[in-house]
Amino acid sequence: MPAVSFQEVAKTYTGPRGRFQALSGVSFDIEQGEFFGLLGPNGAGKTTLISILAGLTRASAGRVTVMGHDVREDYAAARKALGIVPQELVFDPFFSVRETLRIQSGYFGVRNNDAWIDELLENLGLADKAQANMRQLSGGMKRRVLVAQALVHRPPVIVLDEPTAGVDVELRQTLWAFIARLNRAGHTVLLTTHYLEEAEALCHRIGMLKQGRLVALDRTAELLRGMASTMLRFKTDHALPAALEPQARVTGRIVQLKAHDATEVEQLLAALRSAQVPIEDLEIGRADLEDVFLEIMQGGALAEASA
Ligand SMILES: Nc1ncnc2c1ncn2[C@@H]1O[C@H](COP(=O)(O)OP(=O)(O)OP(=O)(O)O)[C@@H](O)[C@H]1O
Ligand SMILES: [Mg+2]
């Protein structure tokens, strides 16, 4: 039995300005114990898919199960198997951190949960804020409480929708160490993030959504292998030769160019030299998940091959 199964899931939102198809025919399974990454640009449908999984939004078509429980027909059992860290910060400002976690435990019928609550607070760097009211916390701290809240009932499946947005480096590392530990202990993890280096480091397998469709689904290592293996990176203040423009990824002064092998590296450098483009800090490195992501989202050859 997979931990999560999406079968031909579609979602159409109907609003004052007509209908909008947010998801079309999305099908994939997440196996028990997997650390799965769901990636896609803003508006691709990630949160919509998670809302359907959580039973907060109804799919227009298709079927979703969590640990074998249908999210509609068997809502309570499906919901209990899930711990969801939502993308939006929502909470009651009048309760303290500890009260918030006790109330959430009660909601799932878990009694005498203080030992686990203390462990969560400790692991998420919230031990000294246990008595603070939610409204007294900073944004990053509120997000930590959301993570603790999702985990109070020790759910087998943990869903994190952009858990590290606005979170400082130190907490990110503590959070990932903690989530990785839970994953090693057998919890299934579904993560969405725009930090692709996090996804590359953590996820066994990755699915990519583009305009509501699943356009890639593979093991992280396979996605990286499928990519042109070498990237040329350098800095320049000059415009690139027109011939190189279409294949360049430019971020401020940093330019990245794809090369399949050493001959192509030489050709690229020769093209830059003959166009008299001065370059600094030249590096030759391997393609990373961000390169794969951009290639797939721009509808490159890889997207067709793996869709
Ligand atoms: N309640 C709603 N009514 C109408 N349209 C909606 C609603 N919720 C989401 N959408 C639309 O559905 C599409 C997918 O949104 P969704 O929030 O799932 O994207 P996302 O992949 O989570 O993006 P992000 O990376 O920005 O979080 C967007 O175009 C969004 O405007
Ligand atoms: Mg979202």
Image: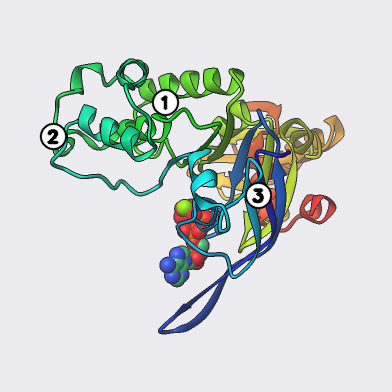
Colour setup of the view? rainbow
**Percent position (x, y) of residue 247?**
70, 51
Q: In the image shown, does 203 or 303 lie closer to the viewer?
A: 203
Q: Secondary structure at mark 3?
A: strand
**Which of marks 3 and 2 precedes in the sequence?**
2
Closer to us: 293 or 139: 139
Instruction: Sort mark 2 into few (<14), some (14-19) or many (20+) by Cα contacts within 10 Å.
Output: some
Which residue, given by chain and number where applicable, does mark 3 sit on? 208
Residue identifier under label 1: 172
Placement of the C terminus among the 4 image quadrants: bottom right
Query: In this figure, which residue is indicated by the disc labeled 2?
Result: 136
Q: Choose mark 2 or mark 1, whichever is in front.
A: 2
Amino acid type, residue under disc 3 in the picture: Met
In this picture, residue 150 sits left or right of residue 136: right
| Alpha carbon separation for disc pair 2 and 1 | 21 Å
The label nearer to you, 2 versus 3, is 2
Neighbours of disc 1 within 10 Å: few (<14), some (14-19), many (20+): some
Name the foreground residue: 54 vs 253: 54
Q: In the rendered image, which quarter contains the N terminus?
A: top right
* Residue 228 percent across, percent down from the top left: 79, 39
Badge 2 element: helix
On screen, residue 66 versus residue 160, left or right, reads right
Q: Secondary structure at mark 1?
A: helix
